[in-house]
Image (cartoon, rainbow, N blue to C red):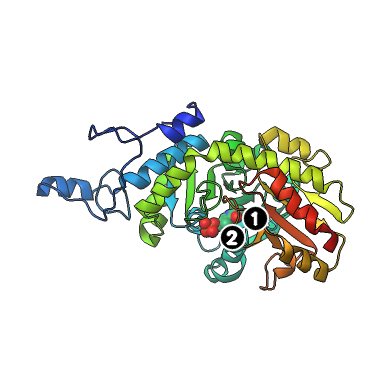
Amino acid sequence: MTEDNLNISYITNILGENDAEGIHSVTPPIYQTSNYYFRNVEQFREAISSEKDNWIYSRGNNPTTNLLCRKLAALEGAEEALVFGSGMAAISSAILSNIKTGDHIVCVQNPYSWTNTLLNTNILPRFGVQVTMVDGCSTQAIIDAVRPETTVIYLESPNSWTFELQDLKAVSEFARAKGIITILDNSLSTPLFQQPIKHGIDLVVHTASKYLGGHSDVVAGACCGSKEMIGKIFANEFLTLGGILSPFNAWLILRGLRTLPVRMEHVSRVTHEIISFLQTQPKVKKIFYPMLRNNEQFSLAQSQMSKGSGLFTIDLDSTTDAIEDFCNSLTYWRMAVSWGGFESLIIPSCTFVRPGLYSSFPPTLIRFSTGLEDAETLILDIEKNIHRL
Ligand SMILES: *Cc1c(COP(=O)(O)O)cnc(C)c1O
C-alpha cells in the first residue's frame, strides 16, 4: 500500500500510532526487546518460515523500528522502507543488493565521501565490481558511461558540497528501459522538498543522522522503494549483514520527524537570508546553492525540488590563513563534520587532508549548514568576522 496521498502532519503525528493497550499515550512505546516468544510449536514453526511477516527477533522486525519504516515510506511515497544503523549501512545494502562480481556501476562525481570510498577504494574493487564516475549534470554523460554489464546508476541530487543536480525523470526513464536500477541519496532535500520515487527513481537512500533526526544525537539510515526491492534487501543484506537500528534510536528519529516540517521551513528561509547577505560581500566569489536564480541548474531544481534546504557552500577570494582565522573566530557557526542538526556548522575545504576526500576541490571553500538559530544571529556572527578574509 502506498500512503503518499496522506498529508505530512498526519504521517509524522498519527500514522501507525494506534493505541493497542488503550492507554492513550501520545507517543509510541519503545519495544526494547531483542526477542519474541511463541505459545506453541506450531506457531513457532509457522513464524520461522517467514522472517519478514513475523515477530521473531529484532534483527528482523521490531514494532518501534517498523513504525519508523512505515512513516518514512509514506513520506517518500514508497511502498516500503527499511531503517539501518547508519546512512552508510543503508547505502551499502541498497548497492550490494543490486550487484555481483563483473557488474558495473555508473555514479555521479563527488558523492558523499564514504559512498565514494565504498565504490572506489576499499570494498567494491575487492569484489570485481567496476565503477565509472560521471558528471551527472549531463544526462548524456550518464547514458554514455553505461555498458552492457551496468546494473546500477547511483545518484545524489543535489550532492552535499557543490549541489549538482541530475535530471531525475530523464535518467530514470533511460535506466528503466535498460533494466538498470536507479538509487538516489535524498538526504539533502528530505522527502519534504523532493520525492524522487515520483520521478521514477527505484530506491531512495537517506542518512537519518542529519535532517530526519535533526538533533545531532543519533546515527541512522533508511532505504525506501518497492515492496519487491525492499523485500529483497530485507531477506539478504539487512538480515545477513545486520546493520539494524536500535528501537531507542528509531524512537529518537520518530521524535525528530514530528518537527521536520517546521525545521525544514526554518532552515530554508534563514539560508536564503544568509545567502542574500553573502551576495553583497566582495570576498565571496561564488555561492553554491541549488535554488539561486543564477545557478545554471535553477530551472531543473525548480522542476524537481520544492525548496532548497539549509546547506550551501561559498568560494572565497582569500588565503588559507585568512580563511582559518575567519573560521576560528565564529561563535555560532561551529566547526564539525555532519550537518542537518539544530546547531549551525561549517567545514572549510582546507581541512581535507585524507587522500581521495573531495580532492578536486580548491582549499578556498567553506560549507555551511544552517541550524535552528535566527537569521540575525547567524548573519551577525559572519558580519563581525568577515574582515578577517
Ligand atoms: C552523512 C551522509 C551520509 C552517511 O550517513 P551516516 O548516517 O553518517 O552513515 C550519506 N549521504 C550524505 C549526503 C551524507 O551527508
Q: Amino acid at mark 2?
A: Thr
Residue 3 in view of the camera? no
Residue 109: x, y in percent? 70, 57
Residue at label 2? Answer: 115
For ligand 1, tell me if the residue under mark 2 lies within 8 Å.
yes
Q: Secondary structure at mark 2?
A: helix
Residue drawn where x is 50% and y is 60% of the image: 100
Could you give the CA–CA distance between mark 1 and mark 2, rounded to whole angstroms? 10 Å
Assign ligand 1 to one image quadrant: bottom right
Disc 2 residue crowd, few under 14, some 14–19, many 20+, Cα 10 Å: some
Residue drawn where x is 23% and y is 48% of the image: 49
Identify whether 266 is placed above or below 95.
above
CB atoms at circles 1 and 2 under 8 Å apart?
Answer: yes
Residue 33 in view of the camera? yes
Residue drawn where x is 76% and y is 54% of the image: 382
Q: Quadrant of the N terminus?
A: top left
Residue drawn where x is 59% and y is 60% of the image: 115
Disc 1 residue crowd, few under 14, some 14–19, many 20+, Cα 10 Å: many
Residue 341: x, y in percent? 57, 51
Residue at label 1? Answer: 107
**Residue 277 occupies which quadrant of the picture?**
top right
**Residue 194 occupies which quadrant of the picture?**
top right
Identify whether 326 is placed above or below 67.
below
